[in-house]
Image (spheres, rainbow, N blue to C red):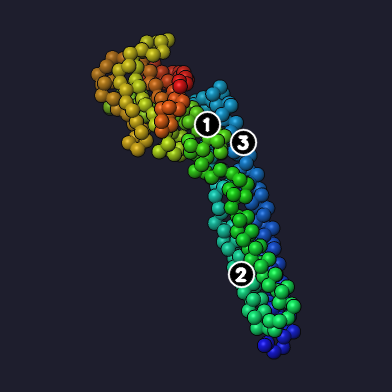
Amino acid sequence: MIENFSEVSSVLFGVSSGLLTIVGLIAVYITLNSQQSVEKAREILWNLQSLNFSIKKNFSEENTDSLQEIRWWFRHYENLVSKSKPTDVVTYLAIITICFVAFSWTTFTLMVDLSSPLNVFMVGSILVLLSFSYMLFKLNDNKNLGKLPSYHELMSMNHKDKTEMDMLQILKKTTICEVSFEDDSSIKLFFHFPFNKMEFKYEVTVFDTEEGILGGEAIASSHFTLEELDTVYSPSELMGMDLDYLLVRVDFWHDSKEQDIYGREFKFPLFEYKEEDDFQTV
C-alpha cells in the first residue's frame, strides 16, 4: 500500500495531464500534416492517371517542360507517400510518452488496493491510451491512411488495376532515342523514369529507309531485357554503310508477348532526329 495516497495520485495526475496535453498537440500536428500530404498525393495521382488519356495525342519528347513536370510528379509523389523522418521521430516520442504514462498508472494501480472500484476505471483508461498510441502510429503512414498505391506499385507495370495507369504507354512515350556515328555506330535509349526494369522487355529493329517511306529493309535487329541492357546498342551492321535515312523501331511489351505490344518509331534523316510515328500492335 502507498502512504500519502492523495499526494502521490495528485502528482501523478498532474504529470500525466501535462504529458498527455503535449501528446494531444502532437496528434493534431500529425493529423494535419498527414491530411495535407494525402490530399496532395491523391491530386498528383489523378494528374498521372490523366496521362493515359492525353499522352497519346498531346505529348512530345521535344516538350521538355512536360517531361520535367511528369518527373516532378513522380518524385513528389514518392516523397508524399514515404514516411517523413522528422515526423517519425515526433510520433515515436509521443508513443513513448503514452507508454510511460500507461506504465506509471499501471504501477500505481498495482500498488493500491486492488479491490477498489477505481481500478476498473484506471485499467480502461490505460487501454484507451494504448489504443490511441496505435492509431497515432497509423496516422503517419500516408499510403495506408489514404489507401494510395506505394511508389513501387506506381512505377510497376503489373499494378494497372490498382493504379489505373498504363505505365507501358508512358514508358513508350517518354523514351528518347539517339543515333551516333562519331566513333562507333550506336543507338542510345534514354529512360526518364525509374520504371521497374524486371517487368518489361523490348526489341530494337533498325531499317534502311528513304525519305517519306516508313518501314524499309530491316538491316539490324536485337532483343533486349533490361537485365542485360546498358541502354546503348551498337549494331555492327551499320558500320561503313552509306545510309541517307535510318528508321529505328522499338517494341515494348510486358514479361509475355501474349499481352499488347507498344511500338515506337524514330526516323533519322542524315542521322539527325526529324520526326516520329507511333503505332500499337497486338
> Measured along the vertical axis of the image, is residue 102 above or below residue 253?
below
| Residue behind mark 2 | 99
Instruction: Kindly identify which numbered label has been placed on residue 166.
Output: 1
Judge from the rendering whether residue 189 lies leftward or rightward of residue 86; answer left or right.
left
Classify residue 17 by image quadrant.
Answer: bottom right
Quadrant of image for the N terminus: bottom right
Disc 2 element: helix
Q: Residues within 10 Å of mark 2 (few under 14, many from 20)?
A: some
Q: CA distance from mark 3 to mark 2?
A: 40 Å
Disc on the earlier residue, 3 or 2: 3
Q: CA distance from mark 2 to mark 1?
A: 46 Å
Residue 273 in sight from this viewpoint? no
Image point (36%, 25%), residue name: 204
Mark 3 vs mark 2: give the one in front. Answer: 2
Horizontal side of 55 relative to 4 (left or right) equals: left
N-terminal of the pair, mark 1 or mark 3, is 3
Residue 22: x %, y % from top left: 68, 66
Q: Amino acid at mark 3?
A: Trp
Dividing the picture into quadrants, the one containing residue 281 is top left
Compared to residue 89, the image places residue 269 above or below, namely above
Q: Tell me, for residue 46, which label it has, or none.
A: 3
Badge 3 crowding class, 10 Å Cα cut-off, few under 14, some 14 to 19, many 20 or more, is: some
Q: Which residue is depicted at the point 66% across and 48% down?
A: 36
Which of these two is toward me, 113 or 189? 113
Q: Residue 88 sits in which quadrant?
A: bottom right
Give the quadrant of the C terminus: top left
Residue for point 34% across, 20% down:
206
Q: Position of residue 99 (x, y in %)?
A: 61, 69
* Whether residue 34 is situated above or below residue 66 in the rendered picture: below
Quick one: label 1, few (<14), some, or many (20+) residues within 10 Å?
many
